[in-house]
Image: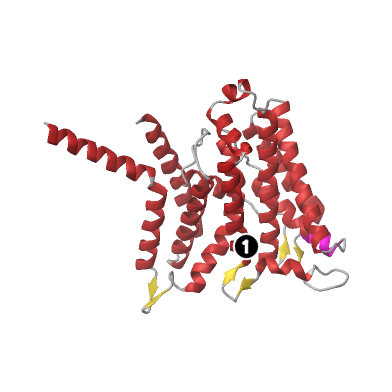
Amino acid sequence: MNIKTSLNKNNVSVFELLKQFQSYIALIAIFIIASIICVKNGRNLFLDVRNLMNVLRAVSENGIIAIGMTIIILLGDIDLSVGSVVGLISTGSAALMVNNGLGFIPAVSVSLLIGAVYGLFNGTVVTRMKIQAFIVTLATMNIARGLARFWSNGIGIPLSYGRGEGLAAPEFEWLQVRIGGIVPVPAIIFLVLIIVFSVVMNKTRFGRQVYAIGGNATAAHLSGIHVQRIKTAAFVISAVLASIAGMIHSAQISQGGPNEGIGYELNAIAAVAIGGTSMSGGKGTIFGTMIGALILGMLDNMLGLKGVNSNLQLVVKGLLIIIAVFAQATKKND
């Protein structure tokens, strides 16, 4: 009887361990599968250094947005406007340089300020008017997209670099450069932001308050936490990070486009959910979100290398979100 009980306990502990590290296991599994199946004419397309760097570059934009989304979801809210903010800032940064003649630092500063103001608007409406974040950001998603199209007259603004009228600041081109011809600058920005916000969420008062509010907003308020202020700050951070992603995106495609960023909110939410953050708030990590973004990036890359239709890739992402949320619900019920 004692042996049986011990075996049962061991089985439970192994199962719990697997659930606890399910994101990491999924990442390793996808990496191994991609390494095995993405071979052509004796050459491993997936493990090619250039391809792996492409994955990192592609992951960076989504990952940066997902950092902000993680903070929002930890609070028990959601931000559906981030994809449109990418489009707005992609357009805005290009317009400020090409049409208004702003240099690199002024253009970046104004773009980040626009993002901050947009996030402040989201946070203020959610907290002061007591409207659900889902509804508010669904509305502001359309507002940002409309502003982007109005700003550019509905067309993309091509980026040509140089000094002079109609040219973008040469420094902006650094956002698409590969250091040593290999490591993409966006990947470095992403990793730096991961480190910074991991420290913020784990070591600062702001981070502890976010977790407290997500766990129980009423109890957090009664304990003296200014819930409205923290929530507003989170929406500002989310929009600013989406703005950074927007500038990186415009540099990558050498164009500021009002239609860019469509569906990016889905990718960000998927990265957060797959990374293990509870969709009801209070539990999750920035590092877990990085793992989720890498899983999505490698999956997209693997399916692309195998020639799978891009529309089916959307189906896979949707199913992954359902599986991730279901796994979270199973954790809660155990």
Q: Seen in the image, is 237 located left or right of residue 329?
A: right
In the image, 31 versus 11, the foreground residue is 11
Is 302 in the magenta? Answer: no
Q: Which residues are magenta?
A: 94-99
Screen quadrant of the C terminus: top left
Q: Seen in the image, is 29 located left or right of residue 48?
A: left
Q: Above or below — where is 296 with respect to 116?
A: below
In the image, 162 versus 227, the foreground residue is 227
Screen quadrant of the N terminus: top left
**What residue is at 65 percent from the left and 46 percent from the top?**
82
User: Quadrant of the rendered structure where residue 28 is?
Assistant: bottom left
Res 12 seen here: yes
Magenta stretch: dominant secondary structure: helix
In the image, 189 versus 318, the foreground residue is 189
Q: Position of residue 168 (x, y in %)?
A: 80, 67
Neighbourhood count class around disc 1 (C-alpha, 10 Å): few under 14, some 14–19, many 20 upward: many
Q: Position of residue 49 (x, y in %)?
A: 48, 73
Q: Disc 1 marks which residue? A: 186
Q: Position of residue 259 (x, y in %)?
A: 69, 54
The number of numbered discs placed on residues in the rendered structure image is 1
Outermost residue, left direction?
1
Residue type at tag 1: Pro
**What residue is at 72 percent from the left and 26 percent from the top?**
129
Question: Circle 1 — which element?
Answer: helix
Q: Seen in the image, is 273 located left or right of residue 25?
A: right
**What residue is at 18 percent from the left and 36 percent from the top?**
6
Outermost residue, top direction?
222
Q: Position of residue 290 (x, y in %)?
A: 52, 52
